[in-house]
Image: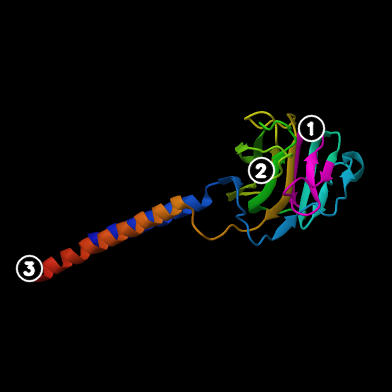
């Protein structure tokens, strides 16, 4: 009986470890695509070659495409939209000449999501910028931090950045010459393209595999001990 209880405890622990790993925030930096079939996608293809913020993006309305709305919050001189090297399509999003503020990403109709990816770069000619982020849910900060260094847009977008595992309804991004903390009024020059919201591949992360294997080993060990004790008891009888 005791061995069965131990087995149940080990199984519960394994499930708990898996749930904890699944709910933890994962930050992706300069990697390959991890959302292969997005539910929503904004590639900025309807923007045109050049657009000033004050005329094309008045107030908080932003630019919407594919179910995703992108807005610049701050004081930009304009949004440069001509695509950079390795960008998707003909257009992308860049706070031209640098701006004091951040790029804000939400679902056009509102709602929450738990996985987002995007191409990211910066307008700093010599590089050296980092991607700072702030994730919010209902106006309350869920997470904030530094997602890693950004390439210069002169060399193009090197890879995908993004987040998964938590629940949020707003993503704020900026590319200043700073490692943080996130400052809504910082002078920055972030560039973005191919924003996708959807589900991450079902393949568990390496750490998740390790915990799952440990859980199964534990279950097997306790099951073995239980069967051995039962055999001994039958022999004694």
Secondary structure type for disc 1: loop
Q: CA distance from mark 1 to mark 2?
A: 24 Å
The vertical placement of 124 against 33, above or below, is above
Residue receiving disc 3: 236
Could you say where residue 197 lies in the image, as x and y percent from the top left?
A: 68, 55
Q: Main secondary structure of the magenta part?
A: strand
219 lies left or right of 90: left
Could you say where residue 162 lies in the image, as x and y percent from the top left?
A: 63, 47
149 lies left or right of 185: left
Could you say where residue 53 lies in the image, as x and y percent from the top left?
A: 87, 40
The vertical placement of 103 against 34, above or below, is above
Label located before the other in sequence (2 or 3)? 2
The mark lying in front, picked from 1 and 3, is: 1
The vertical placement of 113 against 129, above or below, is below
Q: Which mark is residue 136?
A: 2
The mark lying in front, picked from 1 and 2, is: 1
Query: What crowding class fits label 3: few (fewer than 14 Cα within 10 Å), some (14-19), or many (20 or more)?
Result: few
Report the span colored magenta. 80-107
- Report whether residue 5 is seen: no
Could you say where residue 54 lies in the image, as x and y percent from the top left?
A: 90, 39
Instruction: Assess whether mark 2 and mark 1 are in contact (beta carbons under 8 angstroms).
Output: no
Instruction: Assess whether mark 3 and mark 2 are in contact (beta carbons under 8 angstroms).
Output: no
Label located before the other in sequence (1 or 3)? 1
Residue receiving disc 1: 98
Secondary structure type for disc 2: strand
Label located before the other in sequence (1 or 2)? 1
Residue 26 belongs to magenta span: no
The vertical placement of 186 against 224, above or below, is above
Secondary structure type for disc 3: helix
Q: Nearer the viewer, residue 65 or 88?
A: 88
């Amino acid at each position: 009986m005791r061995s069965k209880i131990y087995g149940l405890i080990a199984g519960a622990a394994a499930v708990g470890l898996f749930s904890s790993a699944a709910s933890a925030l994962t930050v992706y930096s300069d990697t390959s695509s991890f959302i292969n079939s997005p539910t929503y996608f904004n590639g900025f293809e309807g923007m045109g070659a050049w657009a000033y913020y004050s005329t094309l993006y008045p107030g908080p309305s932003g630019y919407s495409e594919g179910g995703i709305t992108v807005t610049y919050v701050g004081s930009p001189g304009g949004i440069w939209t001509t695509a950079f090297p390795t960008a998707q399509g003909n257009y992308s999003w860049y706070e031209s000449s640098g701006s004091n503020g951040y790029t804000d990403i939400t679902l056009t109709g509102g709602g929450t999501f738990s996985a987002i990816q995007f191409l990211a770069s910066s307008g700093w000619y010599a590089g050296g910028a980092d991607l700072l982020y702030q994730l919010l849910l209902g106006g309350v900060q869920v997470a904030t931090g530094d997602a890693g260094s950004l390439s210069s847009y002169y060399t193009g977008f090197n890879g995908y950045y993004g987040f998964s595992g938590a629940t949020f309804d707003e993503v704020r991004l900026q590319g200043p010459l700073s490692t943080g903390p996130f400052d809504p009024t910082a002078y920055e020059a972030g560039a973005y393209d191919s924003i996708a919201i959807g589900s991450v591949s079902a393949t568990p992360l390496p750490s998740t595999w390790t915990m799952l294997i440990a859980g199964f080993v534990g279950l097997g060990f306790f099951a073995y001990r239980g069967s051995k004790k039962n055999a001994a008891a039958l022999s004694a009888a």
